[in-house]
Image (cartoon, rainbow, N blue to C red):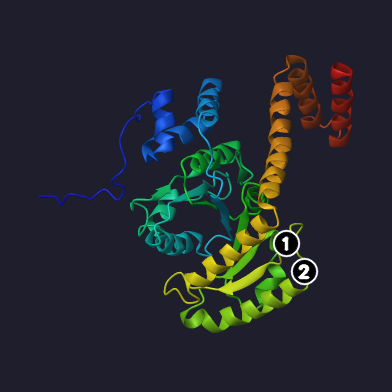
Amino acid sequence: MAKEIKNINPGFRKGPGRNYTLEECIQGVKHRHTDVLSFLISKAESHLDVDQAFVQNVISETSIKEDCRIIAVSGSPGVGKSTFLNSIGADLLHRSHNIAILPVDPSSRISKGSILGDKTRMEDIAHKPGCFIRPTSSSSSLGGVAPSTSLAVSICQRAGFDYIFIETVGVGQSEYEVRFLVDCFILLLQPGGGDDLQGIKRGIMEMADIVIVNKSDGELLNKARLSYDAYNTALKLMLPNKWGWKTKALMYSSVDHTGRSKEIFSLIDKYFSQLINEGNLFKVRISNSMIQFEKYSADILLKAILKDSKISSYISDLSRSLKEGKSSMSECLFKLKEFVKNVYG
């Protein structure tokens, strides 16, 4: 007789999940019911106006947890983001904190990721009370962050989580976009003996509030120390960010807790204390909201313009002309600009 295969995801249910009423969702958010939270995030990812309106109704009837900490964990593929979150997440749960983890699902046509992999690397916390893990989709094929991720964060804030972590794809665009969704940006780096410093864009380092050299254990320990020294030297040459925070670096091992998570939490506490004491946490969140509004409002306007039959027809004509070699790209763009100007004044 064939041996029964154990379901690696015992929470998986075939077929469509249950529908919840508006009142059930409002109460579910207030009481942190994970099934309701997943249902709402699915609604947030929908392109249907009725689903978007439903989510907004829930948001308008619930209030956020002001002292919730929203943190991005970023880094290149393979740096150990999921394992890191599993490690510090276990410590936070042990300290009786509630945590939400929102891995950004890399829906890029080029770099396809695996949420299953993320789940299995967070197996120590995935099914623990007080922990909610729900992947959110990235935008189009750029590896960026979709508006639904912002809604997912807002939903989790209203559910009263103490910590909300966003795990990025780690392919560039997502790192820039997620910076404006969070209060604190943690950048994980691989041990590389300091040579890898040359391959890190200055902009990525400047976005980070905390830099952690992960995998600081075993045969990589010496390389990790060299990397830590190199990053520390580089960070000393950088100015504080606009809120007055000077980026700090730490060493850590998600496997044996070398460097101890206590040091990470101490630094996170120091970061948030400085923001709050100087009245900047509210300013950070307002600044983030303004940047998101500008981005997504432009997307809404673009979609509305592209639905205009005159515009879409003219774009098709220009595309055909470009494809047939009758016009150059710059000529087509100039013609489109003039056409839009004539249509909308």
- Residue 206's disc is 1
**Taking the image as drawn, is residue 54 in sight?**
yes
Three-letter code, disc 2: Met
Image coordinates of residue 168 in percent, x first then y, are 56, 52
Q: Residue at x 33, y 53 (%)?
A: 128
Dot 1: few (<14), some (14–19), or many (≥20) neighbours within 10 Å?
A: some
- Residue 238's disc is 2
Image coordinates of residue 38 in percent, x first then y, are 42, 37
Image coordinates of residue 285 in percent, x first then y, are 66, 46
Whether 198 is drawn above or below 163: the answer is below
In terms of image quadrants, where is residue 25?
top left
Image coordinates of residue 3 in percent, x first then y, are 15, 52
Q: Please, which residue is most extreme toward the front here?
A: 277
What is the quadrant of the C terminus in the image?
A: top right
Dot 2: few (<14), some (14–19), or many (≥20) neighbours within 10 Å?
A: few
Three-letter code, disc 1: Glu
Left or right: 63 in relation to 198: left
Q: Are circles 2 and 1 on residues that touch, CB within 8 Å? A: yes
C-alpha distance separating marks 2 and 1: 8 Å
Left or right: 297 in relation to 253: right
Q: Residue at x 85, y 18 (%)?
A: 344
Whether 17 is drawn above or below 121: the answer is above
